[in-house]
Amino acid sequence: MIRRHPLAEQAAEELLQRIGSGEWPLGQKLPGETTLAAQLGVGRSTIREAIRELAGRRVLESRQGAGVFVIALQATEDWDKVLRKADIADLMEVRLAIEAEAALLAASRRTPADLKMFRYTLADRQKASVNAPDDWYVEADLAFHRAVITAAHNAVLAELFDTLVPRIRRAMMDMLKLDETHRHRHDQAAHEAIADAIRDKDPERAADRTRQHLSAVRSTVS
């Protein structure tokens, strides 16, 4: 019997447990709302909300005129939760994969506007590296990396990077607190090298310089 608040979340968890226990196997149609409501001791509106939640988590699927079916035996974890729990080393590995590919593409696709943005963001980053508050410096650093992603001219890659930015920002703030030698603030040359390779239209060098830079950062936390 479901008694505690919030009812819909509790109902969703109960349904998920019953699916996981094998009561409703993969592909099985769930009982109707009235039956489920009686079994769980909640209203039909609560059952509908619980089903919507599990549909959003890709466990259930509502099919018009047919009913609700089990399409997975466990919930896919929310992407934001995955990122919040990710440790810095894992995050850096993902950045390596994404940003090295972005640099490679940028070297083939960059435009005059992209090169202008590199000059602006590099200059801004250089200024911020000298005694600026950590949050200002982090934003300046991220602006350069975002400029590289933008120069790749791939909307999906840009969207993926943007989903990582909040977690990257927190990771950078954490790393700066532990960086007594200010090593991260003094790697302007590594960023200049990435921009130079993209400007020279050298994809392999651009990707390699990006890998070298991010690998050096990762080595400080692994």
Image (spheres, rainbow, N blue to C red):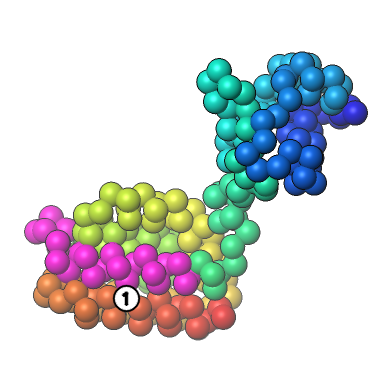
Q: Nearer the viewer, residue 127 or 26?
A: 26
Q: Nearer the viewer, residue 199 or 176?
A: 199
Q: Is residue 211 magenta?
A: no
Q: Residues within 10 Å of mark 1 (few under 14, many from 20)?
A: many
Residue at x-position 85% and y-position 24%? 39
Local SS, label 1: helix
Q: Nearer the viewer, residue 98 or 20?
A: 20
For the question of whether residue 16 can be seen, the reply is: no
Whether 210 is drawn above or below 71: the answer is below
Q: Residue 205 is drawn in which quadrant?
A: bottom left
Question: What is the x, y in percent for residue 192?
Answer: 24, 76
Q: Range of the magenta residues? A: 92-116
Furthest-left residue in this view: 112
Question: What is the x, y in percent for residue 134?
Answer: 48, 64
Q: Main secondary structure of the magenta part?
A: helix
Question: What is the x, y in percent for residue 195?
Answer: 21, 72
For the question of whether residue 42 can be seen, the reply is: yes
Name the amino acid, label 1. Answer: Thr
Whether 26 is drawn above or below 167: the answer is above
Q: Is residue 105 magenta?
A: yes
Residue at x-position 77% and y-position 45%? 22
Question: What is the x, y in percent for residue 173?
Answer: 53, 64
Query: Is 30 positioned to the left or the right of 82 in the image?
Result: right
Query: Is 75 positioned to the left or the right of 156 in the image?
Result: right
Whether 153 is drawn above or below 3: the answer is below
Q: Quadrant of the image for the C terminus?
A: bottom right
Q: Residue 149 is drawn in which quadrant?
A: bottom left
Residue at x-position 72% and y-position 19%? 33
Q: Quadrant of the image for the N terminus?
A: top right
Which residue has dot 1 on it? 210
Q: Residue 28 is drawn in which quadrant?
A: top right
Q: Nearer the viewer, residue 6 or 18?
A: 18
